Image (cartoon, grey):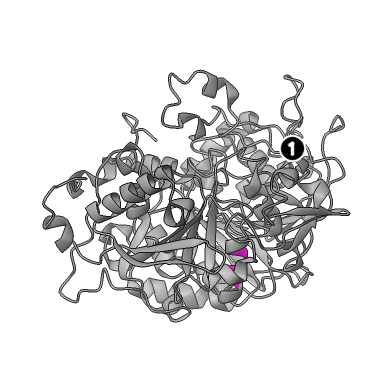
Amino acid sequence: MRKRSGSAPGEMKYKFIVGPAVLLVVFFLTITNFDNHSATQSISSDFHPSPPADSETLQYSEQVSPSSLVVGEQEGGEEAVVDDARREEEDGGGVGGEQQWELCGKNEGLRDADYIPCLDNIKAIKALPSRKHMENRERHCPDPSPTCLVPLPQGYKQPVPWPKSRDMIWFVNVPHARLVEIKKEQNWVRKSDEYLVFPGGGTQFKDGVMHYIRFIEEHTRVVLDVGCGVASFGGYLLDKDVITMSLAPRDVHEAQIQFALERGIPANIPDKSYDMIHCARCRIHWHADEGRALLELNRILRPGGFFTWSATPIYRDDEEDKSIWNAMVSLTESICWKMVAKSIDPNGIGLAIFQKPTSNSCYSNRDVNSPPLCDQRNRSDISWYFLWLYPLLQESEEGSENTWPEEWPARLNLRPTSLSIDPSIGHTEESFHEDTQHWKNLVTGTYKNELGINWAVYGIFAAALVDQPLWVMNAVPPTAPDTLPIIFDRGFIGIYHDWCEAFNTYPRTYDLLHSNNLFGKLTQRCSIVGVVAEMDRILRPGGWVLIQDSPTTIEKLDSLFKSLHWETTVREGQLLVGKKTFWRPADAR
């Protein structure tokens, strides 16, 4: 992605993180039913204040899994209320009248059940002056955001519950028969009666993924799987208590990542986040364009972290593959990566593992300063597109910043090393431990794959649910304090996301959306109707929303959700619990 003049630092980081992934990443929430004891997906964003006193705590009904929810002080005061009133007519909500909905693509005669607004903006893509650097794969968000509803696939069913969904999903929910035909020889996916079945294979997994995983280094917790196919690698790492974010481009072999999302397997990214990055035949030319793509991996890989690469250049001897391998060796040496393993298994599949250094000494001792180190003083203005090598943090007197995190699950409750790096965040070690205990006491019950729009901060919501069979995608707004590094340090995943724009994920990704005092800030910048339409797009029928906000905002949201024919309950005027139904406008077919 190119650097755009006038972009705020937070905006640039958010755009890259979300841009390349078809699944933005915030896509994996699968919580079919609170009554199911199945794995669930969730999103969490954060603007939350300090924990209130117990007297301020709202209680959930018996029908909702969490036992209680804390109400924070509403930000914005009277000014925000005035702004809400000013937008009443624009938002179409409130108590003044019911919002009228129609299906996306109605005027164009289209009915795309897989519509992703920021990746399917055909008008913007056609107007691009160049696609040389895959600009067409970047985010091109409509302005204003769409307020239409995405249709359901014909015959859509309640998703198969976790963990069964890891091995099979309903074909009617993701009806892509062409990919099944293309990949039938690679053991990725096959059709069996009404289901798509995932044997665990793939181009590099012909004998099943468990055999392949034995090659991978142990003691990792947070993994990025690039070009993830149908995400069998990440799916089976869940058994090893490893959380894998799966990343893939849109519309390559009919949206393979959508299979991963339907299965309930997670799919963006601050500096030094991942313990390991994995690529098995991911079709990315890491050595091309002077190594731009590999330099981005270097940015997001933790010091001392591993890049695991399985591709034909490792084990084939034809001239093209040998040329690519030599280029990769030269490039990795130039950025001081050490090749710690190279092997070929009994099936002839090759694997190479590279390790990133833990200090800057190698960078400064290079004979040729290429790629050059970036100037940290201008760090916030740097786009991933530029050919710079990000220096590692200089070690403090304690030498803690670049040390490897404690093994999971110990790292969950220890003070993250990144907590003290940026004092401007405004959070202390004391507040970190208080919030951890606070949410642990409040959140109980079984979720599947919950999406918490607004409890991201330190990943507290995810930490409180760590013993449940689910995973949480923490969404940190680019306008909020940057706590995403802390979340990764703790062993969770997350992304930067502005809810005034659409998520880079397929429709019907999540089982639960959770928000804590988010909308008061959003309504100062964008229409609440567009945000609600986006929530409807990424939430599965039968999925839930848990929203805590001001009484004025809750009243408006309740009206909008009811216009969508959702089932809603409001507790004490500040907590909204909603369940999405299968309803679509009358012309859905």
Q: Look at mark 1 in the image and give the residue it sits on.
A: 113
Q: Is residue 323 left or right of residue 541?
A: left
Question: What element does badge 1 sit on?
Answer: loop
Q: Residue 282, image x and y in percent?
A: 51, 49
**Count of labels in the image:** 1
Q: Quick check: can you spot residue 449?
A: no
What are the residue bounds of the magenta stretch? 234-238
Q: Quadrant of residue 123?
A: top right
**Relative to 123, residue 271 above or below:** below
Q: Main secondary structure of the magenta part?
A: helix
Question: Residue at coordinates 32% horizontally, 58% vertically from top-left?
Answer: 425
Q: Which of 173 and 131 lies nearest the eye of the viewer?
A: 131
Q: Residue 465, image x and y in percent?
A: 59, 72
Q: Quadrant of residue 192?
A: bottom right
Specify the quadrant that holds the C terminus. top right
Residue 467 among those drawn in magenta: no
Q: Residue 177, image x and y in percent?
A: 78, 42
Question: Residue at coordinates 37% horizontally, 52% vertically from top-left?
Answer: 297
Seen as rendered, the residue at the extreme bottom is 410
Residue 235 among those drawn in magenta: yes
